[in-house]
Amino acid sequence: MILETERLTLSPVTPKDGPLVHPIMADPEVMAHWDVAEIEDPDVVDEVLAGQVEAMAAERAFHWAMRLTGDGTFLGLCDLSDIDWRHKRAEVGFILGKDSWGQGYAYEAMQAVMTFAASQGMERLWARTQVGNDASEKLLAKLGFEEEGYMRGHVGREGGRRDVRLWGRLL
Ligand SMILES: CC(C)(COP(=O)(O)OP(=O)(O)OC[C@H]1O[C@@H](n2cnc3c(N)ncnc32)[C@H](O)[C@@H]1OP(=O)(O)O)[C@@H](O)C(=O)NCCC(=O)NCCS
């Protein structure tokens, strides 16, 4: 399903997006608050995308590549994952290359994703953020998500444990 916003076109991720995603996921700053450290091996990123394509085919997720409608510039990815159709809920996620930060793109994309989720009958969206991911938390709050929980040491990364906030929003 292609989603259009004022400035953006969101289209389902394909394996061809790999070379555009590689530099984003190899960037330590972008991946600073991700569950895994930056991924330097392009083959591993391709496996991640293949998993996303598979999850879409199985109707477990929607993963979109985000582009500027004007000139087609690739900005990043966003998704509804871990879909539970019975309980009408999904997790939201988003990742943009550094050059695109701070211009309202994630907010604009996620508004369209939330409208789409509602059109599919979903009634609850949730998200997780690592403590310290101010951009993500600000974005979620602006989208109407509320903090629902605090999970101590929920993520194990690079030999340490990281605290995670749980966010939720009813549609
Ligand atoms: C999180 C992320 C997608 C936000 O994308 P973005 O397009 O820059 O966000 P927006 O421009 O739509 O901003 C949304 C709100 O967050 C705020 N914000 C953005 N970056 C911020 C930052 N670094 N610190 C504080 N607030 C920030 C914006 O000011 C805006 O609020 P405002 O309109 O009240 O000013 C982007 O920073 C990113 O890709 N981060 C790395 C990957 C990541 O951590 N993903 C999430 C994992 S849970």
Image (cartoon, rainbow, N blue to C red):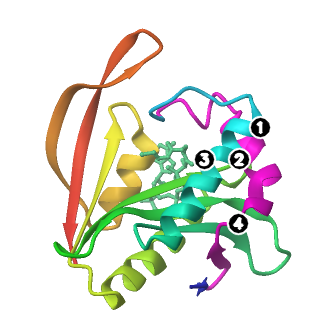
Which residue in the structure is indicated by mark 1? 42
- Name the residue nearer the viewer: 166 or 85: 85
Q: Which mark is residue 14?
A: 4
Residue 73: x %, y % from top left: 81, 66
What residue type is disc 4 on? Thr
Q: Residue at x 18, y 32 (%)?
A: 151
> Helix or strand or loop: what does disc 2 sit on?
helix
Which residue in the structure is indicated by mark 2? 46
State which tag comes first along the sequence, 3 or 1: 1
Cβ atoms under marks 1 and 4 closer than 8 Å: no
**How would you rate the neighbour count of disc 1 (Cα within 10 Å): few for under 14, some for 14-19, many for 20 or more?**
some
State which tag comes first along the sequence, 2 or 4: 4
Cβ atoms under marks 1 and 2 closer than 8 Å: yes
**How would you rate the neighbour count of disc 3 (Cα within 10 Å): few for under 14, some for 14-19, many for 20 or more?**
some
Q: Residue at x 38, y 31 (%)?
A: 132
Q: Residue at x 35, y 48 (%)?
A: 137
Cβ atoms under marks 2 and 3 closer than 8 Å: yes
Q: Which residues are magenta?
A: 6-33
> Helix or strand or loop: what does disc 4 sit on?
loop
**Cα–Cα gap, marks 4 and 3:** 11 Å
**How would you rate the neighbour count of disc 2 (Cα within 10 Å): few for under 14, some for 14-19, many for 20 or more?**
some
Cβ atoms under marks 3 and 1 closer than 8 Å: no
What residue type is disc 2 on? Asp
Residue 101: x %, y % from top left: 63, 52
State which tag comes first along the sequence, 4 or 3: 4
Which residue in the structure is indicated by mark 3? 48
